[in-house]
Image (spheres, helix red, strand yellow):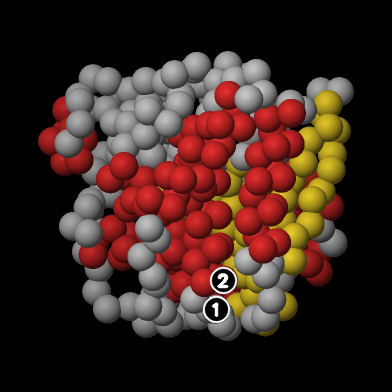
Amino acid sequence: MRLSVTGRSAAAAVIAAAALLTTSAISTAATGSTGPTAPPRAAAAPDIPVANVKAHLSQLQSIASANGGNRSHGSAGYKASIDYIKGKLDAAGFTTTVQQFTTSGRVGYNLIADWPGGDANQILMAGSHLDSVSRGAGINDNASGSAAVLETALTVSRTQYKPTKHLRFAWWGAEELGLIGSSNYVRGLPAAERTKIKGYLNFDMVGSPNPGYFVYDDDPTIEKTFKAYYATKNVSTEPDREGDGRSDHAPFKNAGVPVGGVFAGASTAKSSAQAQKWGGTAGQAFDRCYHSSCDTTANINDTALDRNSDAVAYAVWGLSS
C-alpha cells in the first residue's frame, strides 16, 4: 500500500448481521436496475487452504532474499515475482497477459489472468499489487494479498468452477509509486471494455500481525457480500478509512466500476475498542513493519491471513455466480 499524505484514524465499529442472501447483480449502477439491491448468495465457496497461501509467501520471500532483499518496481525481484505467479497460472489453465509500462525510468509489469468461460460482457475482477517498497520483501504489503488472490485463482482451476460471469485476476506493478500499474490498465481500456467490468475486488495487506477487519464501503452490494462472510465467522467489521483511496481499487472506482475489498490495517494504531473486539494489542500499529525491512514472513498473522483468503473466495464465488 502506498504512503498516505495524512494519517487517518479507524472509523467506529460497524457490526453487520447477515441474513440469507439472494442473488442479484453487483450494483444498481452496473446493471441499470432500480430499487434496492441485495448481495448475492455465495455459490458454495470453497475453503482456501492457508498452508497453500503461506507457501506462496515463502516463495516470494525467497525471491526477495535472492534479489537484494526486495521486490520493488523495476527490480529483478519484482520480475521474478511476476514470473512465479504467471507460471502457476499458466499451468492451471489460465490465459495470461503481461502488460509492460515504464515509470520512474524503470520497466514495470502488470499480470492479467483470464479464466476461460463465463459471460464476456459481465466480468468480475479480483486483484492485488505485487510490488514491495525498496526497503524490504513486502510480505504483508503486499505478498499477502497477491498470494490470497493467486490461491483463489488456483482453486477456481482445481474445482473447475464454471461461473456465470467471466473471471479475471490481476497483479499490479508500481502501486507503491502511486497506483501506476492499475491506472495504466484502466486508462488503456476502451470505454466499451470498461463497462463490461461489473466489479473489481482489491486485496492489499490481508495478513497484518495485529489485525483489524476492514471492509471497503464503496459499493453496497459488494460490501454486504464481504460482511456476510465475516458474519459467518462471528467477526465484526469496520469500514476501511486508513486505506481508502490509497490502493488499486481507486482507478477503477474513478472510472465508474463498482469496487470493494478487505484490509487488515497498516500503520495506524489499534484502539482499545478495536483490541477488545478483535484481540491483539491496543496502542500498537496494525502492522509495525509497514514499509520496513522487517516485513518478512514473520510479519503475518495466520488467523487473519486464513480468514481473509477465504473472504476472497467467498466474494469471487458469490459475485460471479
Q: Which residue is mark 2?
A: 157
Looking at the image, residue 228 sits to the left or right of residue 24; the answer is left
Image point (24%, 74%), residue name: 19
Q: Nearer the viewer, residue 317 or 80?
A: 80
Image point (17%, 28%), residue name: 272
Image point (39%, 70%), residue name: 46
Spatial CA span between label 2 and label 1: 5 Å
Number of numbered labels in the structure image: 2
Which of the numbered marks, if any, corresponds to residue 269? none
Residue 288 in which image quadrant: top left
Residue 42 in which image quadrant: bottom left
Please name the amino acid that badge 2 sits on: Ser
* Rendered view: 119 above or below 127: below
Please name the amino acid that badge 1 sits on: Gln
> Label 1: how many residues lie within 10 Å, few (<14), some (14-19) or many (20+)?
few
> Dot 1 lies on which element?
loop
Q: What x and y, as percent, mark residue 297?
A: 42, 31
Q: Which residue is mark 1?
A: 160
